[in-house]
């Protein structure tokens, strides 16, 4: 049968690869648990058009054991991507996504235990990395996005919503003080050092210069402190202030974006029982009904000037 179309894009790899690594430093251990996706592009057309698998490279997890950067998710993602474009001449691009789970040390008598950990919440770290070696491995370029998701926060005061647009379809009442809860998801783009060539050998120097762990810690601090202290006029206003703080505290961040679903807590009408539950404009309710959906969804991207 005559072919009516031509192959214009192709990418393959492995998704939902789960791996846990323990790094043992004497009697002190470090734990990393990841879900990884690796996708490859390059001279792989014949595997589609001619059923020729000789160009198909297996995408396994062996580097979780051999990489010295496994405890640093952004650097580990760069190592994985550089590995594939360096080792296989016909692979020109590699895309690595990592979701990391949060394991924190258990405190015993006020001190962090050396090898015992607790999953303290559903918060997850995110990395998206793409390495392009189309112009040769020695000229490889990378894009790097880091973030987090499922960071659930709530404040019982310090949030209002009023003076919004009203028309004949508006039923929402204005309120000067309300419950504000959201599940934070965010990304920030990091510019790699321009004067350090991107290579496996230089990853240690790149990681040292950028200090991804400090950036992540500062971003998380900015999220929580702004959420807690901002007298929020709206989710939009608080979101924008937070992203501006990212740019101030982390010079390596070129842009950042955030998605905040508004987790609604509806004050319960207790007047049938002769009880006042603060349903008016001034707020002050104490009993709420948590509602999963529908919810508001507020997104924003801020780019450095």
Image (cartoon, rainbow, N blue to C red):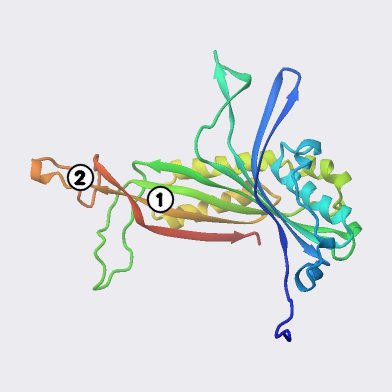
Q: Residue at x 9, y 41 (%)?
A: 273
In percent of width and height, residue 62 lies at 78, 41
In percent of width and height, residue 163 lies at 31, 62
Q: Are marks 1 and 2 in contact (CB under 8 Å)?
A: no
The quadrant of the rendering that contains the N terminus is bottom right
In percent of width and height, residue 49 lies at 77, 73
Q: Kindly identify which numbered label has been placed on residue 232.
A: 1
Q: Secondary structure at mark 1?
A: loop
Residue 210 position (above or below residue 305)? above
Residue 53 position (above or below residue 212)? below
From the viewer's perspective, tell me whether residue 33 is left or right of residue 182.
Answer: right
Q: Kindly identify which numbered label has been placed on residue 219.
A: none
Point out the tag, 1 or 2, that comes first from the N-terminus.
1
Q: Quadrant of residue 217?
A: top right
Q: Residue at x 53, y 51 (%)?
A: 185
- Point out the frontmost of discs 1 and 2: 2
The quadrant of the rendering that contains the C terminus is bottom right
Which residue is identified by label 2? 278
From the viewer's perspective, tell me whether residue 191 is left or right of residue 176.
Answer: right
Q: CA distance from mark 1 to mark 2?
A: 19 Å
**Dot 2 alpha-carbon crowd within 10 angstroms: few under 14, some 14 to 19, many 20 or more:** some
Q: Residue at x 73, y 68 (%)?
A: 10
Seen from the viewer's position, the closer of residues 49 and 6 is 49
């Amino acid at each position: 049968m005559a072919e009516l179309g031509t192959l214009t894009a192709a990418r393959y790899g492995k998704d939902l690869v789960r791996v846990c690594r323990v790094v043992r430093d004497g009697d002190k251990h470090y734990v990393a648990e990841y879900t990884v996706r690796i996708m490859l592009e390059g001279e792989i057309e014949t595997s589609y058009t001619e059923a020729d698998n000789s160009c198909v490279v297996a995408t396994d997890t062996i580097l979780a054991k051999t990489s010295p950067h496994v405890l640093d998710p952004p650097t580990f993602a760069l190592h994985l991507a550089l590995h594939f474009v360096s080792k296989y001449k016909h692979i020109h691009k590699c895309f690595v996504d990592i979701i990391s789970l949060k394991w924190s040390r258990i405190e015993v008598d006020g001190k962090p235990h050396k090898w015992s950990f607790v999953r303290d919440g559903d918060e997850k770290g995110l990395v998206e990395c793409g390495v392009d070696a189309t112009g040769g491995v020695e000229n490889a370029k990378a894009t790097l996005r880091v973030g987090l998701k499922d960071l659930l926060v709530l404040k019982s005061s310090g949030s209002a919503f009023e003076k919004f647009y009203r028309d004949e379809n508006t039923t929402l009442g204005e309120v000067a003080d309300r419950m504000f809860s959201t599940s934070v998801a965010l990304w920030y783009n990091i510019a790699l050092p321009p004067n350090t060539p991107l290579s496996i050998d230089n990853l240690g120097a790149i990681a040292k210069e950028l200090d991804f762990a400090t950036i992540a810690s500062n971003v998380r601090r900015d999220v929580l402190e702004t959420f807690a202290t901002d007298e929020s006029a709206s989710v939009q206003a608080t979101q924008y202030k937070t992203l501006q703080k990212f740019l101030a505290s982390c010079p390596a961040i070129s842009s950042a974006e955030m998605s905040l679903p508004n987790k609604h807590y509806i004050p319960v009408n207790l007047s049938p029982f002769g009880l006042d539950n603060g349903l008016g404009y001034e707020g002050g309710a104490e009993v709420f009904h948590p509602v999963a959906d529908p919810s508001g969804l507020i997104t924003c991207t801020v780019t450095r000037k």
